[in-house]
Amino acid sequence: MALALYRKYRPATFAEVVGQEHVTTPLVNAVDGGRINHAYLFSGPRGCGKTSSARILARSLNCEQGPTSTPCGTCASCVALAPDGPGSLDVIEIDAASHGGVDDARDLRERAFFAPVSSRYKVYIVDEAHMVTTQGFNALLKVVEEPPEFLVFVFATTEPDKVLPTIRSRTHHYPFRLVPPTTLRGLLEKTCAAEGVQVEPTVFPLVVRAGGGSVRDSLSILDQLLAGAGPEGVTYASAVGLLGVTDDALLDEAIDALAATDAPGVFRAVDRVVEAGHDPRRFATDLLDRLRDLIVLDAVPDAGGNGLLDCPPDRLDLMVQQARALGSATLSRLADTVHAGLTDMRGTTAPRLLLELVCARMLLPAPDDAGTGALQRLERLERRLAIGGVPEAGAGPAAVAAAPVREPARPEPPRAEPARPEPARPGPAREVPAAAERGSAARREYVRPSQRGAQPAPGAVPPAAPAAAPAAAAAPAAAPAPAPAPAAADDWPETAQPGAGPSRPAPAPAAAAASDDWPETAQPGSAPRVRRPHRPPRGPARAWSAGSPTSRCHPSRPTTRTGRTRPSPRPRARPRPGSPSRGRRPHPRVPRPSPRPPRAAASRPRWCPPTRPAPGEPARAG
Ligand SMILES: [Zn+2]
């Protein structure tokens, strides 16, 4: 079985660690200077050399030539700790992902105090240190803080924030980083040369991009490509097929069609992408990458030579042409559109549909109000003028005329204009009236609920005023005749007819009317009275006292009225021919706005109809 490339070419000294000079240089200086700390924390993304560096550190510390950054490689310790060596009893690697519990930490703590078997230092390499539990870290705290002379801890983690702060503060923290593409490419080329396999130069950018800056990932991908290589080596076609990236030819086709505003060409390219079995999302991602390259190329003409762009020299000319054909504003807007589309495509069930929509959006300039669309159209206009060859004199108007013809055909300008005014106009216009309305409405609303019975607003004013006024006016008027009182309290009209109303004196009805309903507040004597509590008790009491047969219909209410001697003032219900209330009806009392009347009117009529006939007869009879 072949050894994986990333294991086969694992660095054996700090000098061989690629792309982490900001970390290895200080470590080398520390080891060479004899300033060795008892605990280190190596953090960084996966596959960028943390564990390898920890092993190199252990090897450097234990080399028989003394702690040195350049292990001799020949002594027993160096041989044992070589990347392909058998390992040493004194260098213990712990995978915290599976041994991060407190028991493991206690076990480690107890063994840590035993002196190294054959080496100068006993080195604990705790991998995935963020997986150690809090209790585990706490168990280690003491030994990490004050370890024996011969003990060195190296914590390696991808998430240093999860390492207990008390542990982190006792370590020297070295942050590793992703490896830059150019460095990675150099490493890949060197590896391929060492392996003796022919690889097309166009393959390396694919591998670098797929590796995402991780050395181990990149080497794994290269390993796979090398493993499947035929006698001709690794070709671009085989790499594209294996990695699932979009063929450059497809991207070129799409870009050229976009530059020419060739809608059929764009959709044909999409169709070919899907027909070839590519993932539309992947195509969009690669298209975005290509647009990025073109944007960089547009801004930095020599980007191909200074490492900003990782593309083979033979493609550079083509890409320069594409960047020129599209222009800065167009490129920027296309990239924005694709990026937004990629976000939308996340998790969608119809990626092809979304990809086609994105393409349609790219072909249609300026549906957005961000100004990029206008810039794009302006750019196109300028280019057309420049291509026309006569920028100002004769072709000026012609070109302008031609351009407008095209532009107006598209609905954007009108859209954009109305869109702006709309929000602007209504904003202020609505605001003013809205505020006014709000104020008035708020006033009305607040007045009504709070002052229902006392001070009604517009609608309620008439009733309230009358209520008070009539009460006072009714009192005098009622003195001579009982009619006014009933008019005021027109709720309970019917039962009053029996004749009790007229028979009673003026004061009685006035008081009754006041206490019974609403005028109470106006009446001095009745004001203190509470309306609701009175009613229920009053009804039955009177019913019994009056002894009128009306009680059979409704024990409480009807009798009450009879006792009160209030003639039926109710205008709508049924004017009684003989009742004095009739003449009084037009009295201001009549209007009853507040919520009570409806309730009374609604409930009483039900009860009353039966009551009236029955009580009338017995009353008269009695
Ligand atoms: Zn050595």
Image (cartoon, grey):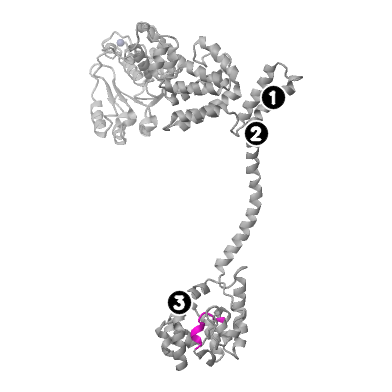
- Residue 40, horizontal then vertical, whole percent: 36, 24
Where disc 2 sits, the SS reads helix
Q: Residue furthest right?
A: 393
Identify the magenta region: 488-497
Position of residue 174 in the picture relative to residue 443 (left or right): left
Q: Is residue 613 above or below residue 206?
A: below
Q: Is residue 441 above or below residue 181?
A: below
Q: Which residue is nearer to you in this view: 208 or 114?
A: 208
Q: Residue at x 43, y 13 (%)?
A: 204
Q: Residue 154 in magenta?
A: no
Q: Residues within 10 Å of mark 2 (few under 14, many from 20)?
A: some
Amino acid carrying mark 1 in the image = Ala
Position of residue 425 in the picture relative to residue 296 (left or right): right
Instruction: Kindly tell me whether residue 169 is visible in this rendering.
Output: no
Considering the image in quadrants, where does the C terminus appear? bottom left
Q: Which residue is nearer to you in this view: 280 or 18?
A: 280
| Residue at image mark 3 | 606
Which one is in front in this view, the residue at disc 3 or the one at disc 2? 3
| Residue at image mark 2 | 413
Label 3 with label 2: CB-CB less than 8 Å: no
Label 3 with label 1: CB-CB less than 8 Å: no
Considering the image in quadrants, where does the N terminus appear? top left
Q: Quadrant of residue 260?
A: top right
Q: Residue at x 57, y 64 (%)?
A: 446
